[in-house]
Every structure is written in structure tokens, then in C-alpha cells.
Amino acid sequence: MGSNLPNSPTYSPAGDLSDRSLLRVSGLCKRYVRGGLWRKRVPVAAVTAATFQIQSGQTFALVGESGSGKSTVARCVARIEKPDAGQILIEGADIAQLSSRELLSFRSGIQIVFQDAVTSMNPRFSALEVIEEPLLIHREAKSDRRERARALMIDVGLSPDWMLRSILNFSGGQRQRLALARALALRPRLLILDEALTGLDVSTQAQIANLLLDLQASHRLTYLVISHDLALVARLADVIGVMDEGRIVEVGPTQQVISGPNHPATKKLLASANSAATKLTRITGAST
């Protein structure tokens, strides 16, 4: 099957990579209850038996249509929500059922960036305060916080001269860079990107995607990317997992999934991505 998608990283396993797994998710389940008051309460399975692993330094993309359960997986891995069943192993330690107190030692190692950066920031804050906030919570010295914030602004492509600017004076793409800087403040090993590039224009998406690749190399990061856009994640991911109705229905190296999709859900996402790429080519071609 042909594809108009951009070139993606190659995936070439070297022997047994199991010992290099940073994250292993096994049998993850999450249910919610709908209804209440005058309506019967009905349990709804958001995620059922999700299983995958990410090697250290890899990018694993979990893609699917809205409501497929991919963001629920992300929230469970970050332990924003507690799964009903299954294991979430971070370098062998299962964090799935840990209490809030027990999770404290793991929090700094797993950070998440959401789609709308500004909603996760205090609108009264300056760029400096946004980046410093997690460092302040972890009681780092003021001088160390300032120096760390300055270095991170440079790393994400923002001038440190803008540290005292209100976040409301930054563009959408710049706010996403700020969100990345804040997420990196505690030196995480796993960074979860939950639709973090969605809503940005195509040019800004490309810039942020390139930035993510640079940051991955310089900060030795492992990524879990959540997206509905197969074309977008193809630029970043080593491995793609496809979700449909709460289940992971296909997993494979990026080029394999793109060139030879097996599940109908994957084929549908690929067709949508190719259609969008074709439309974009026609639009840009007509404007030149």
C-alpha cells in the first residue's frame, strides 16, 4: 500500500531489548461509570488489557480516533488516574497501584505535556515562574532554579531575555515550548506527549517535531506520544501502537505499520493521513 507520509525513523531491533525497557505496560484496564441521579449507572471500559513496552531512548506512538482510549492510557501511565487492573513497570518497579505518597519518588521521572499548554499554566505567571514551579515544589535553591530555567529556555529555542514576560504574551507554539521546558525541569526519563502538537499550524508542528528530536538526543529522553494523526507521529516514532475501542489492535515498527497495515482501524487512520497529506500538497502547490 502506497503512502504520502513523511519518512520516519527506522526500527532495527538489536538482539533482545527487554533489558533496556524503560516502560512496560501489561494488561492495563480502566473503566468509568456513566449515569447517575435519574439514569442507571453503567460501567464503560475505556481501556481493556493494553500491553506494550518502550525501550529506553525510543519513541512509542499510541494512535487512534477520538474516544479510542489512548489518552486514558497516558493518564494511567502518568498516574494522574489509577488503573483498575494491570501493571505499569518503570524500570521494573510497578507503579500501577501505588498510593499518592508512594508515588512521590517516581513523579519527577515521568512528565506529561498536554495539547493546550496554557490551561496547565497559571495565567498570572511569567515564563520564569512557569518553568521554576516544579523546582520550587521540590525545594531547589533559588539560584539553581533560575539557572535551570535559563538553560531550559535556551534548549527549547526561547530567548532567556523573555523570562520575565507573561505567558499571555507568547504565541501558541512558544507556549508549547514553555510547557516542554517545564516538563524537563525535573530531568525526567519518560516524557508523555498527549496531543501536544495538535492545534498548531503545520509549520509550527514541524518546528516542534524537530525540537522534540533534538531534545530527545540532548536530554536522553524516552517518549510516549499520543495522537490521532498518523502522519504526524510517523516523523517521530520508532514504534506505533494503534488503539480502537479501548484495545491496542496493532503494534509494530513505524515503517511496517505504515507500509503494511493489518487492522481496519490502522487502514482507516492511514487513509485519513494520506488524504490530509494530498490536500496539503495541493494547497501549497497552488500557493506557490
Image: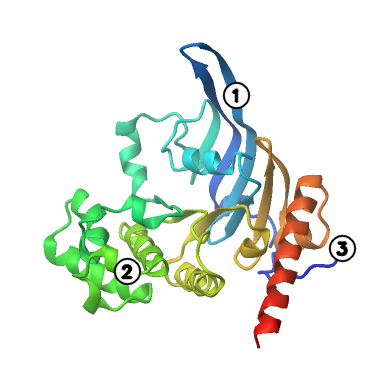
Q: Amino acid at mark 3?
A: Met
Q: What amino acid is at disc 2? A: Phe
Q: Left or right: where does residue 31 sit relative to residue 7?
A: left
Please tell me which of labels 3 and 2 falls first in the chain.
3
Q: Residues within 10 Å of mark 3 (few under 14, many from 20)?
A: few
Question: Distance of mark 1 from mark 3, alpha carbons?
Answer: 35 Å
User: Circle 2 sits on which residue?
Assistant: 170
Q: Residue at x 60, y 39 (%)?
A: 69
The residue at 83%/58% (across/down) is: 260
Q: Which mark is residue 145?
A: none
Quarter of the image that includes the C terminus: bottom right
Measure the alpha-carbon separation of dots 1 and 2: 40 Å
- At 62% from the left and 64% from the top, the residue drawn is 232
Amino acid type indicated by mark 1: Val
Image coords of residue 117 (percent x, y): 38, 56
Residue closest to the far left: 142
Circle 3 sits on which residue? 1
Task: Label 2: state its secondary structure.
Answer: loop
Residue at position x 57%, y 40% in the image: 25
- The answer to which image quadrant residue 16 occupies is bottom right
Q: Quadrant of the N terminus?
A: bottom right
Residue furthest to the right in view is 1
Residue 277 position in % (x across, y down): 71, 69
Q: CA distance from mark 3 to mark 2?
A: 42 Å
Q: Secondary structure at mark 1?
A: strand
Question: In the rendered image, which residue does mark 1 sit on?
Answer: 44
